[in-house]
Structure formats: C-alpha cells, structure tokens
Image (spheres, rainbow, N blue to C red):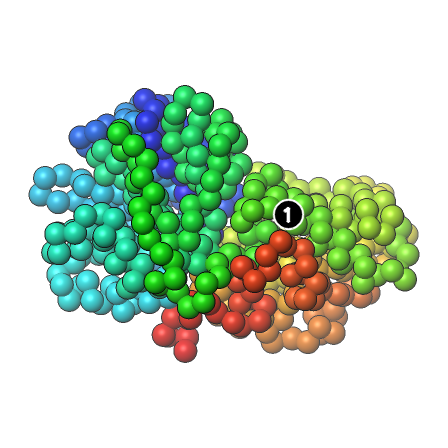
Amino acid sequence: MCGIIGVFGNDNAGRLAAVGLFAEQHRGQESCGMAVSDGLLIRLHKKMGLVKEVFHEEQLNALPGKIAIGHVRYPTKGSATEFNTQPHLVETLSGPCYALASNGDLVNYAQVRKMLENEKVYFKSDNDAELLVKYIAYRILHYKENIGDAIRNLMRDIKGAYSSVLCTPTELYMFRDPYSIRPMIWGKTPEGTVIVASESCALDTLGVQDRKEVPPAGIIKVSDSKIEVLDNDPNLYREGNCEKHCIFEQIYFSRPDSFHFGENVYAVREKIGAALALQDEGLNPDLVVPVPDSSNFIGLGYANQNGIPLSLGLIRNHYIGRTFIKPEQAVRDESVRQKFNVLPNFFTGKRIVLIDDSIVRGTTIRKIVRLIKDAGAAEIHLRIGSPQIKHSCYYGIDTPTTEELIANRRTLEEIREITGVDSLKHLPLTDLKTCVHCPENYCYACFDGNYPVGVPDVYN
C-alpha cells in the first residue's frame, strides 16, 4: 500500500502536500517524497523515512510552486532503497518534464519494461511508478501524442492497479486503472485549490468540502484555465462492466474516518463486527477486546450486536508503525513486541472475545494472545473480521508468496492451536459481502483466488 497526494493552484502547494501526506502516513512508513513545480521547473525531494523526518522547514522552503505531488511508500514492487522512492521524474535535454507518483502494482511490469528497454529507455529503479511515467514520456516523444492519449494507451497496454498523479511544469493529471482497485478521491477547497488523495481523510485535513471519486479509467487534467475530465470508457480496457475495489481497504488499510467507494469505512467495519457476532449467539464472554486500531470499529459492531461490554484492554504504542506493512519478517516480529501491551490486572479470570481484522502471516496475533494469556485471561475466543487469506495479492499489498500466508498452509484447527486460543472463527465471504453496498464491485482475490486483472507471468 502507498498513499498519494496532488495539489494544484496554491502558492503553498508543497506545504499542503506535506500535510496531506502526514494524514496518509498509515499507508506507508518506509519512505516519502514530493515533486513541486513553480511553472518552469519541477523540483524533487525524496528520502527514506517518515513525513515528519523528510520534510522540515528547510526542505519545504526549497520547494516553491503552485503544483505539487507527493507519495508515502511501503514496498511491494522494488526493494527498500532510495532509488525506489517516489515520485519519479523524467528528465529531458530541456530539464525535468514529468513527475509521477502512484499507488498499486502492475501485473505485466516485466513485459512492458522489456519493451521499453528495447526502445533504449533507461530505468533507475525497479518501481512501478517509474515504468508508468517513462511509458507516458515514451509515447509523447516517439508517437507525438498528447498526455491524455498517452495515458489512454497506457491503460490499453499496462495491466494492474494504479491510482496515479502526474505533474508537468504547468499541469496536474490524475488517472486511475479501469477497475479502480485502489482508492482515489479529489475535490476543491473553498479558495479553489484542487487536491487529490488516496483517502478522503487527507482532503478533510486540507479543507476540501466537495469531494468526488476519480472514475474507473478516469483521466482528469487540471490547468490554470480549467478542469477537464477527458473522455475515456473503462469498458475498452476491462472484462465485464464492474469495478473491482480492494476489499482490504475497508477491512484494514484505510483510516476509519475515510470515505471509500461510496461508503464510510467505519460503518463497513461496524457491519463486519455485527455479522461476526451473529455467529456467536450462544457465546457469553465477559468482554470484547479489539486489537487496536484497525479492529476497533469491528469490535464495536460485535459488542453492540451481542450486548457485551467493549473494553480497550490492549494498549498500542502509536510511535511504532503498522506491523503488517513492515518490509521484513524479523522487523515485524520486533515491532509486535514493542507495539502492544496490556492493562495491568485487567484480564485476570476473564473470558475474552478478541477481535482482529485479519490474519495474514500470523505474526501479530500469536504474540498478542500470549500477552493476554500471561495477563491471566481464563478464555480467549478469537474472531476475525474477514475470511481466511489464502492467496497472494498482486495489486498493491505485500504478500508476494503464498507460503507466507498462514491460512494457505494450515487448517483452521492448526491455526487455532498455533495461536493458542480456545476457539477461532472467521467471517465467511458470503457474510462479508453483505457488509458493503455493491459487493459485485469489490476484489476478493486474496480470499477466493479470482483475480480480475490476472497475475504476473512469473506466478502463472
């Protein structure tokens, strides 16, 4: 997962972009960057680290301009190096021309890169966003296309998930894959500044009131003269006429105060919790305890449905990032030990329903259960607000091999024994689909193996 931001038409575009990136920090904690145009020159600053570590007053003062794009990254394609930080810049003999940041993953990256390299296009990284911007530049330089047509051809030739922002010295473009897999929302402030982001919580922070989703296969061009929604039919590039939003955005990734795919994230999570509770009508625990923070609203929905007290007995250290999106397993293990603690004397003798949003590798939940057991809990009944994850994601989530997924190689009973809980239940996929307005418009590939855009050739 990653987070993007784009700002047009404000003298403090870089500062606004930094504020937006800070609101999306949960989407990526490895690196961040920003490209800002003053109308003539695009300046770039990007480094490993958090937003607050990379963008100080000195850096922001060195990035003047009315157009800015930015990115926070957690690595999916491309290693954790500064070369793979975003945005990526295309430089020509006349100076920097285009900068691009993107959220998602491409399934035919290798084939498209080979084609471009055969045309003498040089790559500095192995990151998807560099491929996107260099494909666009290639179409413009070699086929004399305008940017809109270059993006249309990109949608024809490049398959996968991408929610992208592109800036030229004088224009901002936002575009999204035909299935709109990753979220992308935009709008204007009362002063007329155009802002686009991965999540609506970033727009809220920046004062955007009138918000819209970038449509599937949408291409929106913003210049001093106007905002243009360029004609483009998503059905030219996809099979079927449905969007395929990532369901994991609703379950885990997004902030609960965001609004995605036509519904409030927190409301979806409350429905998930209520659906979980309906499986447990005969269970009479003392407390419902969610794993903070992404499971809080799932826990609330469960508690409200079954009339059981909700208690925040697990304490999270908010200065430790999300353990699921740490790039290496050893780092994840260490992060879990530092991230959670229990309230003293809280769990002694209690029968607990422990709520978590998902089990991916099993790293976090095993250690949390051990913490609660050591604190004296009499029973722990683990309830998961999603089906078992048995398939890798190739559209922007870091599960590159099925061997990493505990549900792919273990039975439910084996996982219960490994985690050490008294009982374990997942929300069935059929029940999950009742928790969203248009279930046909979501991707469930990590649960059922049905990939709407296919998988990379290396995995076929």
Asked if residue 324 is positioned above or below residue 21 in the image, the reply reads below
Residue behind mark 1: 294
**Image location (x, y in percent) of residue 311:** 80, 43
**Image location (x, y in percent) of residue 422:** 82, 65
The residue drawn where x is 33% and y is 31% is 8
Residue 69, visible in the rendered structure: yes
Q: Residue furthest bottom?
A: 460
**Image location (x, y in percent) of residue 7:** 36, 33
Q: Residue furthest left?
A: 93
The residue drawn where x is 53% and y is 67% is 445
Label 1 amino acid?
Ser
The residue drawn where x is 90% and y is 56% is 284
Badge 1: how crowded within 10 Å, few (<14), some, or many (20+)?
A: many
Towards the viewer: 334 or 169: 169
Q: Give left or right: position of 344 versus 428.
A: right
Q: Which corner quadrant of the image does residue 435 belong to?
A: bottom right
Q: Quadrant of the C terminus?
A: bottom left
**Image location (x, y in percent) of residue 436:** 63, 54
Residue 354, visible in the rendered structure: no
The residue drawn where x is 9% and y is 43% is 93
Q: Give left or right: position of 433 versus 50.
A: right
Q: Which corner quadrant of the image does residue 32 belong to?
A: top left
Q: Give left or right: position of 454 versus 170.
A: right
* SS of the residue under disc 1: loop
- Give the number of marks: 1
Towards the viewer: 20 or 48: 20
Asked if residue 194 is positioned above or below residue 297 in the image, the reply reads above
